[in-house]
Image (spheres, rainbow, N blue to C red):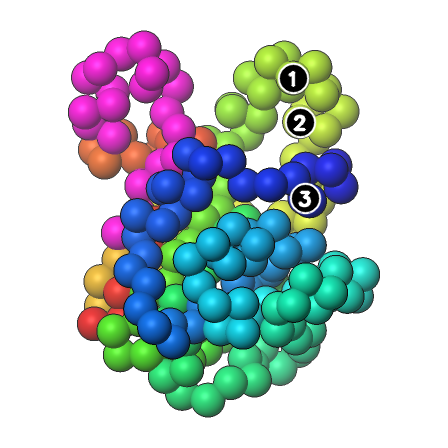
């Protein structure tokens, strides 16, 4: 699985993410849960490297990120604080991370995201959609033949959120929230499904979307 964590981001994924971002001179972005820096490397195509920041708990990954020339710090989940001043970031990117954070800390981090974002800032977030996620796992097990990986749910997913729950949590903090599924069964084959993705978002495989501070 380490190869996946270090693999380059696809052009399609880059286009989708950058469609939510408007880069300006001096714009700063925090990749919260940056792994080995694959998304930071992608963002470096659009941001100055010194304006890209990572947050990561794995020491080896932190060394790799810093080696690539990016800022990076190690979060202390007991404190659930982000060590930057108010209104510091234009964007916070958080992909497949919040499901690994116990709920009592995750809720504090949502408030911290709001605090360190500029007034016109945006949080871009993605996480699995439970319990629907488990149905897709079964399909992926047969598609990929990775039965051991997909049959058993990830034990590190301690914060299993549905789309509705994540929306409720985010609306407690952010005034504008827009979420949608990343994939719905047969959407590439049935046009009606693709045209009605927002209405069908509850049966989507994963959640992706954004929150605006204003």
Q: CA distance from mark 2 to mark 3?
A: 17 Å
Residue 45 coordinates in the image, percent (x, y)? 47, 54
Residue 213 coordinates in the image, percent (x, y)? 27, 71
Q: Earlier in the sequence, mark 1 or mark 3?
A: 3
Q: Earlier in the sequence, mark 2 or mark 1?
A: 1
Secondary structure category for the residue under label 3: helix
Q: Which residues are magenta?
A: 178-197
- Proximity of marks 1 and 3: CB atoms separated by less than 8 Å: no
- Proximity of marks 2 and 1: CB atoms separated by less than 8 Å: yes
- In the rendered view, does 203 fall on the left or right side of 62? left
Residue furthest bottom in the image: 85
Q: Which label sits in the foreground, 2 or 1?
A: 1
Q: Is residue 185 magenta?
A: yes
For residue 9, say whether it is visible. Answer: yes
Q: Is residue 145 above or below residue 196?
A: above
Which residue is at 63% across, 56% downward? 37
Secondary structure category for the residue under label 2: helix
39 vs 191, nearest the viewer: 39
Q: Is residue 192 magenta?
A: yes
133 vs 117, nearest the viewer: 117
Residue 150: numbered disc: 2
Instruction: Return the residue at label 3.
Output: 5
Which residue is at 42% across, 34% downward? 12
Instruction: Return the residue at label 1.
Output: 144
Residue 120 coordinates in the image, percent (x, y)? 25, 73
């Amino acid at each position: 699985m380490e190869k996946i964590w270090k693999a380059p981001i696809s052009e399609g994924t880059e286009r989708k993410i950058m469609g939510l971002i408007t880069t300006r001179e001096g714009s700063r972005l925090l990749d919260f849960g940056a792994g080995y820096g694959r998304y930071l490397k992608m963002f470096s195509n659009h941001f100055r490297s010194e304006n890209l920041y990572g947050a990561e708990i794995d020491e080896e990954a932190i060394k790799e990120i810093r080696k690539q020339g990016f800022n990076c710090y190690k979060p202390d989940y007991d404190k659930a604080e982000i060590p930057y001043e108010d209104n510091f970031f234009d964007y916070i990117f958080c992909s497949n991370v919040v499901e690994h954070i116990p709920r009592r800390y995750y809720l504090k981090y949502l408030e911290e995201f709001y605090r360190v974002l500029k007034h016109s800032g945006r949080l871009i977030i993605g996480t699995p959609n439970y319990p629907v996620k488990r149905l897709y796992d079964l399909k992926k097990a047969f598609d990929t033949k990775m039965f051991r990986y997909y049959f058993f749910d990830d034990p590190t997913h301690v914060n299993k959120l549905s789309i509705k729950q994540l929306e409720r949590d985010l609306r407690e903090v952010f005034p504008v929230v827009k979420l949608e599924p990343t994939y719905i069964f047969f959407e590439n084959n049935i046009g009606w499904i693709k045209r009605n993705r927002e209405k069908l978002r509850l049966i989507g495989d994963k959640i992706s979307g954004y929150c605006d501070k204003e």
